[in-house]
Image (cartoon, rainbow, N blue to C red):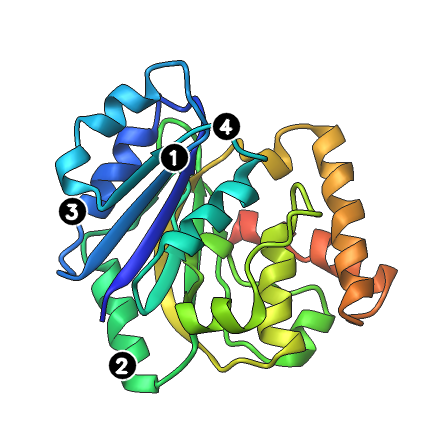
Amino acid sequence: MKISIITAVYNNRETIESSLLSVLGQTWPEIEHIVVDGGSTDGTLDIINKYRDRIAVIVSGKDGGIYHALNKGVCLATGEVVGVLHSDDVYEGPGVLAKVAAVFAEKKTDAVYGDLVYTRRDGRLLRYWKAGEYDASRLRNGWMPPHPSFFARRAVYEKYGSFNTEFRIAADYELMTRFLYKHGIPASYLPEVLVRMRVGGKSNKNLANIIAKSREDYRIIKMHSLGGLRTLFLKNFGKLHQFFVSAG
């Protein structure tokens, strides 16, 4: 089973190398890493090109933002399974993709997801996002799986579409809601940390982005008939416990 991993990056020379090495260090033998660069000017491409002979696809050029870049990657993917690893993130260990592949093979499922931890830039743990088992009612109560830990079959993307670029910040939430809730694809939970995410992503960079994301979330909630303001409230405030849960 080939797994296509898509990394979108723009001017992130500080952390892109650790993300690349995280993929290159995986023990699963069938990996297609697709790196989509938005036309970086800070030396990011120089770092990517150090590993050119070990990266399946590298494309660079101006794009319409992270979700447009991810859609480029989805179009280029040839693996049976597609996952996303952002340029600030790393896999928890070298066996992550092997474990993901094993669940796909054993469960005959269309999606696999796991847990995620947020870390500070120095690596210290900040939050632990324990996803838990999926059922439709949880989405109505504001639940979503961590997107960097979410893997889906390429056939699902082909059937139900990629990221909706009308959403600048929350297109990952819309895509997972569309796959899981609207179309009811079967999903399996892998109960362990799969990804370490450094804080500072676009959706939580500042108050203006948090407000913008909440507006997009509410549009998505209404679009997919998940509820209303109660669902939005639970989605935002239901994450508070993540600051008090240990990953160990």
Disc 3 versus disc 4: distance between alpha carbons? Answer: 29 Å
Disc 2 versus disc 1: distance between alpha carbons? Answer: 34 Å
Q: Looking at the picture, how far across and down is residue 120, in whole percent? A: 44, 32
Left or right placement of residue 1 versus residue 240 in this view: left
First in sequence: mark 1 or mark 4?
4
Give the residue type at disc 4.
Lys
Nearer the observer: mark 1 or 4; the answer is 4
Q: Secondary structure at mark 1?
A: loop
Left or right placement of residue 205 versus residue 199 in this view: right
Q: Looking at the picture, how far across and down is residue 121, in whole percent? A: 40, 27
Q: Residue at x 75, y 29 (%)?
A: 208
Q: Give the labeled residue for mark 2.
A: 105
* Mark carried by residue 124: 1
First in sequence: mark 3 or mark 2?
3
Q: Looking at the picture, how far across and down is residue 46, in whole percent? A: 26, 20
Q: Residue at x 67, y 41 (%)?
A: 168
Disc 1 versus disc 4: distance between alpha carbons? Answer: 34 Å
Mark 4 surroundings within 10 Å by alpha-carbon count, few (fewer than 14), some (14 through 19), many (20 or more): few
Disc 4 versus disc 2: distance between alpha carbons? Answer: 37 Å
Mark 2 surroundings within 10 Å by alpha-carbon count, few (fewer than 14), some (14 through 19), many (20 or more): few
Q: Residue at x 24, y 47 (%)?
A: 23
Q: Give the labeled residue for mark 4.
A: 62
Q: Secondary structure at mark 4?
A: loop
Circles 4, 2 touching at the beta carbon (< 8 Å):
no
Q: Give the labeled residue for mark 3.
A: 25
Whether residue 61 appears in this view of the structure is yes
Give the residue type at disc 3.
Gly
